[in-house]
Amino acid sequence: MGRQIGLLIDRQGRVDMLIVGEPDRILIPELPRARLGETRLRGLRLLHTHLSGEALSQEDLMDMVALRLDSVAALTVDEFGGPERLHVAHVVPVSELSGPDAKPYDVLPSVRWDRSEVDFAALVQALEDEFGRQERAVAADKGRERALLVSVSGAPRIVQERSLDELAELARTAGLACPARMIQRVDKADARHILGKGKLQELEVLCLQTGAQIVIFDQDLSPSQLRNLAEATERRVLDRTQLILDIFARRATSRAGKLQVELAQLKYTLPRLVGKTPAMSRLMGGIGGRGPGETKLEIDRRRVRERITKVRKELESVRRHRSGTRDRRAKAGCPVIALVGYTNAGKSTLLNTLTGSRVLAENKLFATLDPTSRRIRFPREREVILTDTVGFIRRLPPDLQEAFRATLEELESADVLVHVADISHPEAEEQIGAVESILTEMNLAETPRLLALNKWELLSPDQQEVMRRVYPSGIPVTALKRQGLTPLVAAILGLLPTESQTDPAFSAVPAADSDADPDEDVAVWDIEMGSDVVQ
C-alpha cells in the first residue's frame, strides 16, 4: 500500500483501533476521554510502521505525551514489508524539580522486532504510581490553582527572567501557585498564537506535567490570540493586564476604588466581546446579515458602553469631592506629603510607623489601592497631611492609568513627594527608574522630591557603600523602626514652608479625629517635640 499502518492496543492486548496513514505519518483521530485523568494514562499504546527505516519522530513523541498514551512504538520494515527493528518510548513523570532540560518521555534502545522484552503491564503500573505521587504533591498547594508563566519577547533571557519573577509575585498575590515557567526569544511574535508551533506543543506538555490549570503570559495578548491559545491548550489563558485587573478587583475596598477597577475591566473587555456560536460568522454583513447572533453581540457591546459612560460620571463625582477636600486643605494651609514608589516597597509600613496607624501592610504587590491619608499636627498649630498612594509597576496597563487618575490626583496637589524604594530588591535601580519615569509622564518632575532608601538594614556594608555612591541624595531608612526616621522627617520639614521647619526629634501621641474626612479615612495625630513625651 505504501502507507503507514497503526494499531491502538489496550492493556489486554486487544486492538482498539486500526489507523491507515500517509507514507510518512499517521493521524490519530480524537480519542474518548473515558479513562483519562490527571494521575492516569489512557490505557492504550500505539504500534505503527515506519517505511523508511527511521526511528521515532518528534511528532510521535509529542502525540504520546499530549494524548497520555501508555507508550508508542515504531516497527521498521524491509523492502518486502517484513518486520525489522522495534523502537519503543514511554512517558515519564517530570516535575518542577527535574530541571529545565528534563524530557517528558524516555526512548528505549531499538531491538530486533522479535527480541523485545518490555513488560508493559509492570511498566504502566509503575508509571501510574509515580504520577499519583506527583498529583498528591500538587494537591499540597493547599487548594491553590496552578499557573504556568510564559514570556515571549525579543528581550535578552535575563530580562525575561526578571520580568517573570515579578509576574510570579503578581500570581502569588492573586492566590496562584506557579510551578513552572517558559521563555521564548523571538524577533517577531506569531500573530495567531504568539508562540511558535514547536513551543506551543512544549507548552501543552508542560501543562500536563505540572498540572497547570491556567496559562499566564507576561505580554498583552490580542483578543484573537487569547481565543486561539485557549482552544489549543484547553485551559484558561490570561495576560499580564488581566492578572493585574484581577488583583485590583480583589483589593479595592472603597467606592472610588471599585469604580476605577470596574472602568478598567469594562474597557479591557469591550474589544474582546465575541459571539459564542459558529453560526454567527455566517451572519456578518450582506443580505440577511442582521441575524440573532450579531444582534446579541451588539446589545452586549452597547450595554458595556453605557456602563462605561455611567461609571465615568460617578468617578467624576468622586473627583469633584476629592477636589473639594484638597481645596479645603489648601485654604487651611495644610501641606500634603505623598508617599510614592514601586509596589511593595514599604510605603504603607512607613505611614504606619510615622503616624502610629494600622493601615494594611502586607508583603504582596498592590496591598494598597485606595489612597490613605493621616493628618500630623506639628508645633505652632501647623498640620501636615501624609498620604499613601497605590504602588507603581512597570508596564502598568494604559486602561488602569486612566482609571486611577482620581487616585493619582492626590500626587498633583502634593507639596512634597517621598519616593520610597526597596533598596534591598535585586532590581532596585530599575524600579526607581520606572517610578521616576512615571512621575515625569504625570508632569510631576518639578514637585520637590525625596528618595527614601527603605530596608537599608538588609544590605551588607559593602552594598550600603555602593548605594551611597549611586544615590548620594538618598536617605537610608528602616520603615519598621521609628528611631531611624529622624533624618527623613528633618528632610521633609526642610522642604515645607518656613513656619513648619523645626527640630525633627518627634514622637506620636494619638489625638481626637473629629475633624477627619471619612471618605479619605483621615486620622488626626499630634506630633509634639522633645524627649519628655511618653512614647
Image: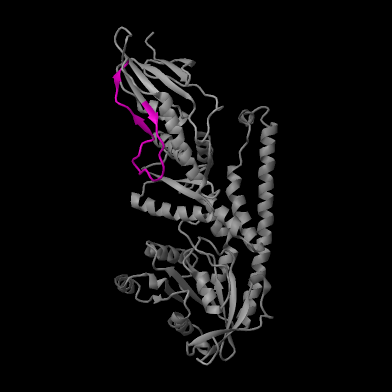
Which corner quadrant holds the C terminus? bottom right
Residue closest to the eye, 129 or 442 = 129
Residue drawn at x 57%, y 91% is 380
Residue drawn at x 56%, y 80% is 335
Quadrant of res 223: top right
Q: Give the range drawn in magenta.
A: 89-113
How far from the left and from the top, in percent, is residue 314? Answer: 68, 61
How far from the left and from the top, in percent, is residue 135? Answer: 49, 41
Colouring mode (rainbow / by chain / secondary structure / one colour)? one colour
The overriding secondary structure of the stretch rendered in magenta is loop
How far from the left and from the top, in percent, is residue 54? Answer: 30, 20
| 90 part of magenta stretch | yes
| 331 part of magenta stretch | no
Residue closest to the eye, 88 or 292 = 88
Which corner quadrant holds the N terminus? top left
Left or right: where 467 falls relative to 265 = left
How far from the left and from the top, in percent, is residue 390? Answer: 54, 65
Left or right: where 519 falls relative to 85 = right
